[in-house]
Image (cartoon, rainbow, N blue to C red):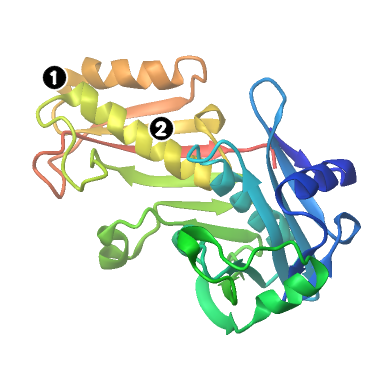
Amino acid sequence: MIRAATGEEINEVWSERWGLPIVTPAGCYRPADVEGLVLLDEVGDLCGLITWSITGAGAEIVSLDAWPPGRGRGSRLLARAEGELQQRGAERISLVTTNDNARAAAFYIRQGYRLVRLHLDAMDRVRAQKPQVPLTGAASVALRDMWELEKRLGPSAAGEPRQLVSSGSPFEGLIGFSRAVRVGGLVVVSGTAPIGDDGKTVGPGDLYLQSRRCIEIAARALERAGASLADVVRTRVLLTGMERWQEAARAHREAFGAVRPASTFVQVAGFIDPEWLVELEVDARTGR
């Protein structure tokens, strides 16, 4: 669950993970200066926090923390914050990271941010407020500068916030589509094919395994858009052969048996790759 963060929660996370205050080229922030969202896990424990400050048509992401790493929680928080900021009229979002943190820069670039500025010697200003900040960071890189990244936000044709989610697939640029699009509380996921992280077809000839892989990709796209499989209201299962539909139905039931979305199974002539036996389209709606 994602909800508004309290001042006490922001203070606790910042004190433990950042130290006070947080200093960026744009400002010096204390918990009272920002707003934010927290992510709670299945048992209600805090597992993520994102904070921001709004100035006119711009917003700065001041901090983003999610734990443990590698579960998509940071992406989910960022997507929800972007939607919130769009609804409040923000036209652009900026953030900074230190010059040793290539991993963070790569994460934000995958989320659609672009490197726009290099703030030379920015860490000198940080150390003026926080002398305990070390001189070196990851991989013994000298901590001197900050990278600034920015993402432009645009309203949808209906005037509602519009968020585009990319998976990095080369087909997106070739065809001109997004892995998922979020407008308000509606999230629409493009047809997902059974492609592994290595770019190869998963489970050649195995419709069940291919169906599971399609669902995994859809789930990842939903999470990056701030939704989940539990929010799905409609699925479309596209098959090259209806005689094996029960294999796809098995994977679908395992993922959506408790959700029971509207669903349609359709036979098609074929897909871009002849090894693909199935594709999956998903529509979801969140409470927002």
Of residues 245 and 42, the one drawn nearer to the viewer in this rendering: 42
- Secondary structure of residue under mark 2: strand
| Image side of residue 166 versus residue 228, left or right | left
The amino acid type found where label 1 is placed reads Glu
Of residues 23 and 34, the one drawn nearer to the viewer in this rendering: 23
Where 180 sits versus 284, above or below?
A: below
Q: Count residues near mark 2 (Cα–Cα under 10 Å), then give few for <14, some for 14-19, many for 20+.
A: many
**Percent from the top left, x then y, of residue 268?**
18, 38
| Image side of residue 253 versus residue 84, left or right | left
Instruction: Give the CA distance from mark 1 to mark 2.
Output: 19 Å
Residue under label 2: 235
| Residue at 64%, 57% in the rendered image | 82
Q: Is residue 88 visible?
A: no
Of residues 101 and 174, the one drawn nearer to the viewer in this rendering: 101
| Residue at 63%, 38% in the rendered image | 286
Q: Quadrant of the N terminus?
A: top right
**Percent from the top left, x then y, of residue 83?**
66, 55
Q: Earlier in the sequence, mark 1 or mark 2?
A: 2
Q: Quadrant of the C terminus?
A: top right
**Percent from the top left, x then y, of residue 261?**
48, 25
- Secondary structure of residue under mark 1: helix
**Percent from the top left, x then y, of residue 239?**
20, 32
Q: Count residues near mark 1 (Cα–Cα under 10 Å), then give few for <14, some for 14-19, many for 20+.
A: few
Where 237 sits versus 102, above or below?
A: above
Residue under label 1: 243
| Residue at 30%, 56% in the rendered image | 169
User: How many numbered discs, if any?
Assistant: 2
Q: Is residue 261 visible?
A: yes
| Residue at 31%, 66% in the rendered image | 173
